[in-house]
Amino acid sequence: MTAQKKKPFTVVGERLPRYDGADKMTGKAIFGPDVTLPGMLHGFVLRSPHAHARLLSIDTSRAEALPGVYAVVTGADLPPAESTDHRYARDNTFASDKVLYAGHAVAAVAARTPTLAEQAARIIDVEYELLPAVTDVLDTTRDDAPILHDDMRTRSLAGRGNKSSNVASHFQHMKGDPARGFAEADVIVEREFHTATVHQGYIESHATVATWSDDGVLTIHTTTQGSFAVRDHVVWLLNLPMSKVRVVPTEVGGAFGGKNTSYVDVAAALLARKARRPVKITMPRPDVFLATGPSSGAVFRVKLGATRDGRITAAQAELFYAAGAYPGSPVGSGANVLFGPYAIPNGQIDGYDVVTNGPRVSSYRAPGGTPANFAAETLLDELAEKLGLDPIEFRLRNHAREGDERLDGGTHGHIGGIEVLEAAQACEHYTAPLEGGPHSGLHRGLHRGRGVAHAAWGNWGGRSSCALSVNGDGTVSLVTSSVDLSGTRTTIAMQAAEALGLPPERIKPSVGDTDNTGYADVSAGSRTTYATGIAAIQAAKDVIAQMRARAAALWDVPVETVGYADGVFSTADALRFTLAELAEQVTSSGGSVSSIANVDVGEWGAGFSTHIADVEVDPETGKVTLLRYTVVQDVGQAVHPAMVEGQMQGGATQGIGWALYEGYAYNDAGQMLNANFLDYKIPTSLDVPMIETVIVEVPYPKHPFGVRGVGEPPILPPPAAIANAIYRAVGVRPDHLPMTPAHLLEKMGVIESRIMNHDS
Amino acid sequence: MTNKTLVSATINGEPVEFLCEPHQSLLECLRDILELTGTKEGCNDGNCGACSVLLDGQLVNACLVLGVEIAGRAVTTVEGLADWRGLHPIQRAFLETDAFQCGFCTPGFLIATKALLDRDPNPTEAEIRAWLSGNLCRCTGYDKIVRAVQAAACLLNAKCEVDA
């Protein structure tokens, strides 16, 4: 459902078939694991079964002696570390002195077949000295916790700590006078929340093929969100010139932030160099859970105060985020999301980045935001309830406007959060009665409830590159270096078509590699349609300018007299060329016309999203059933509404998984117990209803067509929307993710202790 | 080296002979030996459905079938859906209703949908959701996939065109 308004565009806003669609229907599209090169060997990475151990020795001789084995590599094959960050990246490729999580890479083998490579890896003799492991977010901060990095000192505003700690850093945001703000409050609510580690859960595993030319050029075909990010990572770890590494991105079978990071590319490159053959590594699914992704498990202590008339006077929060084995959790963006939508006069946020014996965390769609939104929006709901206010009305009363100062520093730009809340308030779902609820009490009637949650996400701009080349028949080839995760070739080409005044079938978009395109940041941060779209529009404008000059030269008239509209160059004297007619002549009138635009987009529009969830809770089993779900979101301008709906529906469903099902389960030794898609359950088609969408369009003025990022905001609100619905259904407030039946039964007093312990 | 077995089967309507090791799954045989990489590996333990194929018309996970088991039998993979006239109606429905994002799970969903519509040309939404619950999609939230199956049923029953 799109809000009715006058349509200012010809191509933008249409539901067109995707350019890459047919190949994705027939199996022809080449994804990471589909790449094969002549003479290719198969690599297998040996991983530590222990969560924390000293690595005493590695003996690869038995593996090397196996017929059909071509190369074995370990950390000793990597150049020495030059800085702390370099050492972390190096050690996460292959462990050096210690293994820090079960799944930590220790060695790798290249052999004729995948089976043989695995067999050989299994007979590498590794001697470990076991150390106690810690996977819990709070346990790792205790004085008696096992220390992961002896040289780690807490970094904070006060400088560096003077003793070893698993707290890598501490930051603080302070605004106004929180103590005075809480003193002014009539109602104060306060809670602690725990959220489990979750995985991005893309269905395509990481896969890479590395091959060296005999003059020392490394080519890597890999599934990634950023070909240049992989190139730079490999260059950094192998100490190579950038020009000697070419990264060719494949189609990407899901990423969600998890393929911003390079995992097995360096291992494959080392094996390929030693074996003098192409080497492919495809990570088995358990390895993907054990050694890639995930997102941080976290703990929040949050406090909010408001006056009787529903004004928030103060907010205070402590955030602890598990980074896994090396520092770098998204606690910073968690703090951004926490109270992001609201104008709060006084507040303090303390964030802690802590290391644990788990895989090093990676981005996951709005990194760090979803658990923070769960904590803040659940508490906000409680505050609204205590004040007797409608949850949307309470949020509207406190919503930030352009120019308002944020709790985490900076000010709000041109935002559409109020429009989103108002659209949610007015939508049929929110106004429709819910049978059996709200407030149908425990153990009588239907246990149904409706919840809402609201979220803000900053989005991103960044560096992008787009090249356009006019062909002799008037079609235009478009090449970007932005990897296409779910349709951006189409949304970028649509913007080029709009700017060129051409029908979309005249544009032929493709994704280039690091040798033949300009630099681009990773396809992440909801930036690709936005920022690479800006590059495409710039290149289109330059193409038109060049073509106008050609028309002027051919007609022998001043260039200022040549106009261009809807694919036609013309003058007031009725001289007329369609773009195709002029294209036919350009190669014989001064050479081809092409343009490459490189941008570094420093401003971008934030995205706001409100979700409405209707749930039914079975009071005997604790099972939560989603009855109805609506996503309302400001997207600035929907370039391709069907794909925008898809982002909203898919993001919401990932958030639903985070809310109800997903979480790493660890044993006391720190080993993950559910590293497969059976025991780590992501939502199936049976777990979700149709996801209704309301697209709100508050154009972002810095983009020529008003576009804002779309992909990340919809993952934020589901846990809080569902938790708030559960509260209205059964009268208890969940404070753990996932909200398993065991957690709800415990909250309802049906059982005493939790059956299944997740990692937080 | 293990002794290899010669397997004769019909794949996408064509007679095929290939050598495989007894432990190799049908998924490995399709992808690594027969170069039919449209069938995807997502988990290799039967939990994601990305390797869905038809074995004598029955929906199976190719990772849970041994290559040697298909001797004398017929396999349909995603490569067998379209023909020289163009996309199969199920593929058209998925393409034109944007029922895919990354496209990695799509071959499995297309095959699973074919198996469903072959036995029940008019499934309800609940039946579609139950039937597809063995196929994981991390991108779409299933909404557009369920609608695409409904659109494909309509196309196959020659009742409608896809409303893109």
Image (cartoon, coloured by chain):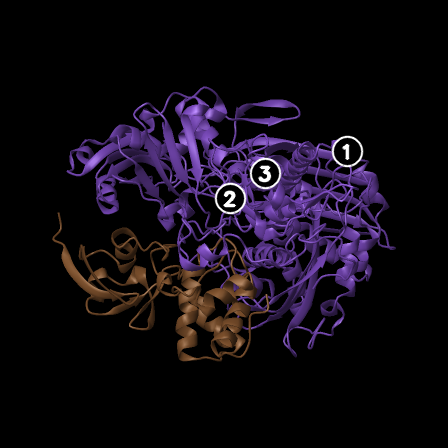
Rate crowding at label 1 as few (under 14), some (14 to 19) or many (20 or more) other CA atoms within 10 Å: few
Residue A746, percent across and down? Answer: 56, 63
Q: Is A123 drawn above or below residue A201 in the view shown?
A: above
Residue A551, percent across and down? Answer: 67, 36
Give the secondary structure at mark 3.
helix
Residue A148 makes an appearance in the image: no
In front of the other: A408 or A70: A70
Q: What's the amino acid at mark 1?
A: Glu
Residue A333 makes an appearance in the image: yes
Chain A, which colour?
A: purple
CA–CA distance in space, label 2 to label 1: 33 Å
Name the residue beneath numbered marker 2.
A510
| Comparing labels 2 and 1, the label whose residue is closer to the camera | 1
Question: In terms of sequence position, does the residue under pointer 3 or pointer 1 come before the other?
Answer: 1
Specify the chain shown as brown. Answer: B
Rate crowding at label 2 as few (under 14), some (14 to 19) or many (20 or more) other CA atoms within 10 Å: some
Q: Is residue A111 left or right of residue A324?
A: left
Q: Is residue A516 left or right of residue A115?
A: right
In front of the other: A37 or A171: A37
Q: What's the amino acid at mark 2?
A: Ser
Residue drawn at (64%, 60%), measured in percent from left and top? Answer: A723
Name the residue beneath numbered marker 1.
A560
Q: Which mark is residue A184?
A: none
Residue drawn at (50%, 78%), measured in percent from left and top? Answer: B158
| Comparing labels 2 and 3, the label whose residue is closer to the camera | 3
Tell me, yes or no, whether the two marked residues, 3 and 1, touch with CB atoms within 8 Å: no
